Amino acid sequence: MDLAAHRAHPGDPEELVSRGAYRTVSRGFVRAVAAARITLWAAGREDEAARLDGVTWHALRHTFASRLVAAGVDLRTVQELGGWKTLSMVQRYAHLSPDHLAAAVEKIVAVPAVVASEAVSVREHRQNFDSAESSSREVEVRH
């Protein structure tokens, strides 16, 4: 199924890949996956055929969004590429793996020395403020 080859304007991102109704395209996809599974089994590649279990049009859409997000693509761009109308729908499809979330946090762990020294300076100011505030409370209580 080479749907992209049948597009009139392949360079136009607004052109649909398939003009068929969703159900028609979905049925064609199901048939293509079944044919691929049979071909793989006949070729003695049972492991690869088994990997096609559960592969659906929708699952590939989910994988598309998840992989884009894991690659660092922002959600607005994923929304546009996938054609989702709302950002909340993209967030449903693009949930992140714990490893990806950990990598995002690691980006801020290696803080440059300048920012680190500024952080110390801010911390010292905060400590001075807190101690001055606590001293003023002590004075108020005594009087």
Image (cartoon, rainbow, N blue to C red):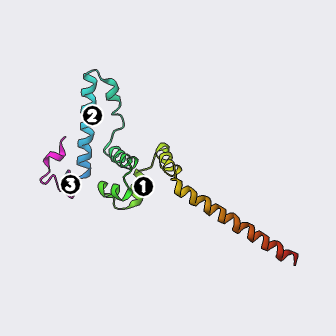
Name the quadrant containing residue 85: bottom left
The answer to which of marks 3 and 2 sits earlier in the sequence is 3
**Which quadrant is the C terminus positioned in?**
bottom right
Residue where numbered disc 1 is placed: 91
Q: For the view shown, which residue lies furthest in the right direction?
A: 142
Compute the Cα span from label 1 to label 3.
23 Å
Q: 24 or 96, which is in the foreground? A: 96
For the residue labelled by badge 3, is the local secondary structure a helix, a strand or a loop?
loop
| Label 1 secondary element | helix
**Is label 2 in a helix, a strand or a loop?**
helix
Amino acid marked by disc 1: Gln
User: Up-down: is 43 above or below 55?
Assistant: above
C-alpha separation, residue under disc 3 versus residue under disc 2: 24 Å
Q: Give the residue at mark 2.
A: 34
What amino acid is at disc 2? Ala
Residue 2 pos. (x, y %): 18, 42
> What residue is pinned by disc 3?
16
Question: Which stretch is magenta?
Answer: 1-17
The front one of 70 and 10 is 70
In the rendered image, the vertical position of residue 35 relative to residue 134, given as above or below: above
